[in-house]
Amino acid sequence: MSKHITVIRQNPTTKQPTKRPIESGEKMKNKYDDEQDPISLWFELSYAQYLTIPRSIMESMSLEWQRKFATLLDELDDTFNWRPTSGRYWVQLKNDSGRYVNDPLMEYRRPNYKYIESIKNKLFEVTK
């Protein structure tokens, strides 16, 4: 019995989900493959200066993804001496009024798996 993987993505124009079957062995084209400024494209039109990703989210990704990401972080560290020599970065969630609020992703030692599952995008659907 063969399995087919259907990629479910949101159409950027209509905001509707679109489905396209992926054939066995087909390499998905990365939307950044032809871009000269892929990081700027990823950040879109924001004025963000930093990328902040909760550790609990990264540790909820597949082991293959974690290995790739950790390898890229090692490559970044090997290329730049970017970490501060004194002080440290500290991230806390604020609401639209600028007040500190509870962050359901803050606790990486005891992650809120129910919350993490509730925010997971359903990008892939396996059908038989």
Image: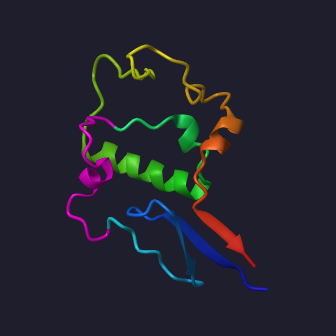
Q: How is the image coloured?
A: rainbow
Compared to residue 123, the image places residue 53 above or below, namely: above
In the visual, does 71 lie left or right of 32?
right
Q: Residue at 56% x, 67% y: name it.
A: 8
Q: Where is residue 114 drawn, in percent x and y?
A: 71, 37
- Left or right, 97 with respect to 120, comes to left
In magenta stretch: residue 39: yes
Q: Main secondary structure of the magenta part?
A: loop
Q: Residue at x 43, y 13 (%)?
A: 99
Q: Is residue 97 above or below residue 76?
A: above
Query: Residue 118 at x, y = what percent?
Result: 65, 42
Position of residue 78 relative to residue 16, above or below, is: above
Q: Is residue 114 magenta?
A: no
Question: For this view, does 73 lie left or right of residue 1?
Answer: left
Q: At which x and y percent is residue 48?
A: 28, 36
Q: Residue at x 50, y 35 (%)?
A: 54
Q: Position of residue 64 (x, y in %)?
A: 57, 58
Please state, as top left, top right, bottom left or bottom right, where the N terminus lies in the image: bottom right
Residue visible at 26% across and 35% down? 49
Q: Quadrant of the C terminus?
A: bottom right
In terms of depth relative to the viewer, which is nearer, 40 or 84?
40
- Tell me if residue 15 comes above or below residue 104 in the rendering: below
Chain part drawn in magenta: 33-50
Of residues 83 and 35, the one drawn nearer to the viewer in this rendering: 35
Determine which quarter of the picture holds residue 90.
top left
